[in-house]
Amino acid sequence: MANFDYDLVVIGSGPAGQRAAIQAAKLDKKVAVVEKKSVVGGVCINTGTIPSKTLREAVLYLSGYRERSVYGASYTVKQNITMADLLFRTDYVIRHEIDVTRHQLTRNGVELISATASFMDSTTLRLDSPDGHSHQLVSAAKIIVATGTTATYDAHLPFDGKTVFTSDDILGLDRLPKSLAVIGAGVIGCEYASMFAALGVRVSLVDKRNELLGFVDDELADTLAYHLRENRVTLRLGEEVKSIETFIDDGMNRVRIHLVSGKQIVADKALYSIGRTGNTGSLGLEKAGLCADGRGRLKVNNFYQTCVPDIYAVGDVIGFPSLASTSMEQGRLAVCHAFQVETRSVPELFPYGIYTIPEISMVGKNEEDLTAAGVPYEIGKARYKETARGQIIGDNTGLLKLIFHMETRELLGVHVIGEGASELVHIGQAVIAFGGKIDYFIHTVFNYPTLAELYKTAAFDGINRLGVVVR
């Protein structure tokens, strides 16, 4: 590797790139991260994960949503909530996370280069300065592409970033709409639909699929659909958008959506959320012997290698599941493989967190998976309202569902919808990882009052369904 400028160059400073760079630095490798934006953190920190989750927290607080079951549907912390109110908290968190990320990279000896990278060949990159007036060539023994994605656009639609916009434009909205059409009921679409609905915005959610979040346990997806409807969200599932037009109504820009079925949706604004496209268009992939698919994504093997062995790709740019948590792990694993460091991971136990209102999280198998595989299973369920903690926090609708093997009682999957679901799921994740049975929850003492008690209640429910005596 002495003939190269760097042992590793990472293109992109999002969660995947950051974790990859730090892992390589811990292995005493000479590492550089190339970031074309003026700030580090990628979409995760600047326009995606961190902003959307912070926005969600601001929505829940200012709208008083969490307390409505106790104080009534009219309860709110602040009347006439504005986008400025929501973004105040978001801006603070973004600034903090950018600083933390930059500090982590620099204290680990990772060189940060502000430039746009493109391949000259499989080991050489051209780095163009932000002002475009200069460039340099650098070589690396290993290269990791962690360029992330951007919201997918349709050139035929009238995007202006204000009336018709994508999730990348949320932070630039000038006002909170009274009505919103969300096109695309994937994770991002469902998250924003539920957030705006919690603020009292009339939301229409459109998707050509007949179900919400097809990879989520059916019962949880149905529960989410119920809550969305309770918050006055109109679900237009099995419907396809034909065209979108903007028009002026009483001096205000509005949008009219024409569906293939002949229906029309009129709203103040439209959020277009039909997937994301990999940021690979400017990389010059062909010079390195690479090519992307129709959505700009790179194909990799189980070690995150592309078809060129010394070039790896991690994070959203390789597609599903496109979560910050899984992207970080992919970055770590790619570096360990690149530098022949033995490591271990359990991808089938990666947890999923969906920050809708209510929150959804899961790990392991769902009922549909096990039915298709012919695995005999049983379930145990517990509702938040059955626990004192659920009553205290005002969540009377949350649900925890355990799936376990009918014969061995080994825990196979955990599915949660409700407050703190993405935290609560990790208890079950640990038990699954060690091959534990649901009996563990029966014999374990949990703090009182906590949501963790749901595991004990659900375990008893499951055992009772088997008709056996608990010992």
Image (spheres, rainbow, N blue to C red):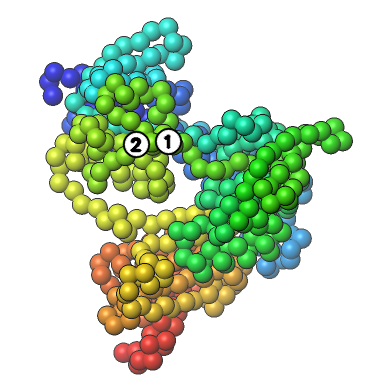
Return the residue found at the far right: 250
Q: Which residue is mark 1?
A: 294
Q: Which mark is residue 352?
A: none
Where is the C terminus found, in terms of image quarters? bottom left
- Give the percent coordinates (x, y) of residue 25: 23, 33
Q: Residue furthest top?
A: 133
Q: Give, as a three-letter code, the residue at label 2.
A: Leu
**Crowd band around label 1 with a 10 angstrom C-alpha radius: few (<14), some (14–19), many (20+):** few
Asked if residue 273 is positioned above or below residue 223 in the image, the reply reads above
Left or right, 156 with respect to 301, comes to right
Taking depth in this image into account, of 281 and 231 the one nearest to the observer is 281
173 lies above or below 324: above
As helix, strand or loop, the secondary structure at mark 2 comes to loop
Numbered tag placed on residue 298 in the rendering: 2
Q: Residue at x 24, y 53 (%)?
A: 345
Task: For label 2, count other residues whose C-alpha is less than 10 Å away and answer few (under 14), some (14-19) or many (20+).
Answer: many
Q: Is residue 210 above or below residue 85?
A: below
